[in-house]
């Protein structure tokens, strides 16, 4: 049986074990919880197969104070990495001198007061990136927000996927999600455990992977990710965007 890893903010335990989220003691957010002061917030998630020791640079200056690998997110605290608005040059690379990972450089136009997630994906010899604007909506009730990102890798084309929620009676919560796509946020029950089962679109067997979602914090926004190698080690993560 292939090993399947679960990461919650940082790479964690095997898929058959209980999962947890490091923000379980956090309090709900309001619109005035933090001030951007005209800056943008940026997170980078590594869905690049075999990536390790990745670091982020903006306009030639280091943004990440630590390195992260496949399934890793920087920063773990969603709103702690702030970048000045405008067109910024990003460099994401492995910091070891002997690495075979190809560095990726790209320009991104950022707006002040906005939140972004950058996903790197594919493999270390062909790294690609996708920047997503996080359309943050702060619920006024006790719910949180959740979206799904599909960055599973295979050398040949893969079918889209459907995502089922056990807490919602095993009904579809994200439908027909293409590879390398990120859905919109949906309202989601906070404070309750859930299991997300992923199937090829239109099928109910076999299950491709299960994501064990821990008790999430109300009013916050999260992303669950399906990544890794389709024929090898699959990796799942759930992390906070806000």
Image (tube, rainbow, N blue to C red):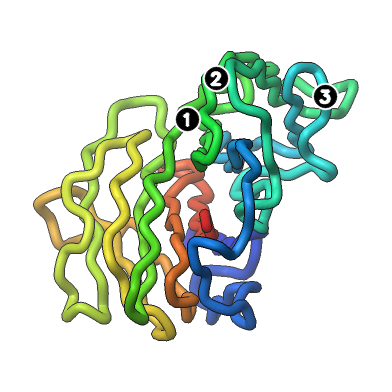
C-alpha separation, residue under disc 3 versus residue under disc 2? 15 Å
- Identify which residue is drawn at 40% across, 85% down: 192
Please name the residue that numbered disc 2 is placed on.
108
Vertical comparison of 8 with 181: above or below = below
- Residue 137, image x and y in percent? 36, 57
Q: Name the N-terminal-most of marks 1 and 2.
A: 2
Vertical comparison of 235 with 37: above or below = below
Residue 226 appears in view: yes
- Identify which residue is drawn at 43% across, 84% down: 191
Left or right: 151 with respect to 92?
left
Depth check, front residue: 240 or 51: 240
Left or right: 94 with respect to 85?
right
Q: What element carries label 3?
A: strand
- Identify which residue is drawn at 33% across, 68% down: 196
- Residue 128, image x and y in percent? 52, 22
Residue 4 appears in view: no
Depth check, front residue: 228 or 111: 111
Please name the residue that numbered disc 1 is placed on.
131
- Identify which residue is drawn at 21% across, 49% down: 200
- Check if mark 1's residue and mark 2's residue have beta carbons within 8 Å: yes
10 Å crowding of disc 1: few (<14), some (14-19), many (20+)? some
């Amino acid at each position: 049986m292939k090993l399947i890893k679960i990461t919650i903010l940082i790479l964690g335990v095997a898929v058959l074990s209980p999962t947890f989220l490091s923000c379980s003691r956090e309090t709900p957010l309001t619109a005035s919880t933090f001030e951007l002061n005209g800056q943008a917030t940026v997170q980078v998630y590594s869905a690049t197969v075999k990536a390790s020791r990745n670091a982020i640079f903006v306009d030639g200056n280091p943004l990440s104070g630590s390195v992260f690998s496949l399934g890793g997110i920087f920063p773990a605290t969603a709103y702690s990495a702030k970048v000045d608005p405008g067109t910024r040059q990003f460099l994401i690379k492995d910091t070891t001198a002997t690495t075979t990972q190809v560095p990726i450089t790209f320009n991104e136009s950022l707006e002040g007061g906005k939140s972004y997630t950058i996903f790197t994906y594919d493999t270390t010899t062909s790294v690609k990136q996708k920047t997503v604007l996080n359309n943050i909506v702060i619920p006024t009730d006790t719910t949180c927000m959740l979206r799904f990102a599909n960055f599973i890798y295979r050398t040949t084309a893969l079918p889209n996927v459907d995502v089922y929620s056990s807490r919602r009676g095993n009904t579809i919560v994200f439908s027909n999600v293409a590879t390398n796509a990120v859905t919109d946020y949906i309202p989601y029950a906070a404070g309750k455990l859930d299991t997300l089962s992923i199937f090829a679109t239109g099928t109910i067997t076999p299950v491709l992977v299960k994501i064990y979602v821990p008790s999430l914090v109300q009013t916050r926004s999260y992303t669950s990710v399906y990544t890794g190698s389709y024929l090898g080690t699959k990796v799942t993560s759930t992390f906070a965007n806000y």
